[in-house]
Image: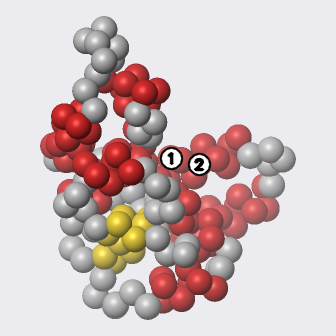
Amino acid sequence: MRGYLLDTNHVDPLFRQEPGITAKYNAVPDDWQVRLCTITLGEIEAGNLIANPYDEERQEALNQYLNENFISDALPVSVATRIDYATLVDRILAANPRPTRGISIGRHLCQNLHVDINDLWIVSVAREHNLTFCTDDTMQLLRDAAYDVQFDNWLV
């Protein structure tokens, strides 16, 4: 599969039809895909629920946009994704070992290394499907570990 997997931070500007990201989206070749994964959709939904103030009209419009453009072919975290996830975790830990065995891997990744677990899963989905991951997050440790994943930023 050729194409792009969008991070959460690319969805709202695309929804708002910001000119720069809209131009990049429209320039994607017809035989390439632009996809979201279910983790990204969960992040968006969580953002909707905790938005303060909650804007029902905007959330309904965003949900309609997602339903029309991304929901039907959203990529799930599959049983196979675990291999890509485990590979990336292994690479990160090989370069950044836990200080003691008493600290959990998840805690070390999140608290010590500032690796967002959701980003780790989303990049794993991109790796599994050989998609370019579009984000404006730095996530340098994850980028270093995912050296076989292409990254792009449509927001620059």
- Above or below residue 118? Residue 61 is below
**Side (left or right) of 140 relative to 77:** right
- In this rendering, the count of numbered labels is 2
* Amino acid marked by disc 2: Glu
Query: Residues under labels 2 and 1: Cα distance?
Result: 5 Å
- Above or below residue 98? Residue 26 is below
Q: Position of residue 10 (x, y in %)?
A: 54, 66
Q: Which color scheme is applied?
A: secondary structure
- Above or below residue 146? Residue 73 is below
- Picture residue at 28% right of the left edge, 12% below the top: 100
Disc 2, disc 1: CB below 8 Å?
yes
* Amino acid marked by disc 1: Gly
Q: Secondary structure at mark 2?
A: helix
- Picture residue at 54% right of the left edge, 88% below the top: 23
Q: Secondary structure at mark 1?
A: helix
Q: Which residue is mark 2?
A: 45
Taking the view exactly as shown, the residue that stands out farthest to the top is 102
- Picture residue at 48% right of the left edge, 85% below the top: 24
Decide: few, some or many residues near mark 2? Use Cα within 10 Å; few <14, some 14-19, many ≥20: some
Quadrant of the rendered image containing residue 143: bottom left
- Picture residue at 65% right of the left edge, 80% below the top: 17
The tag on residue 42 is 1
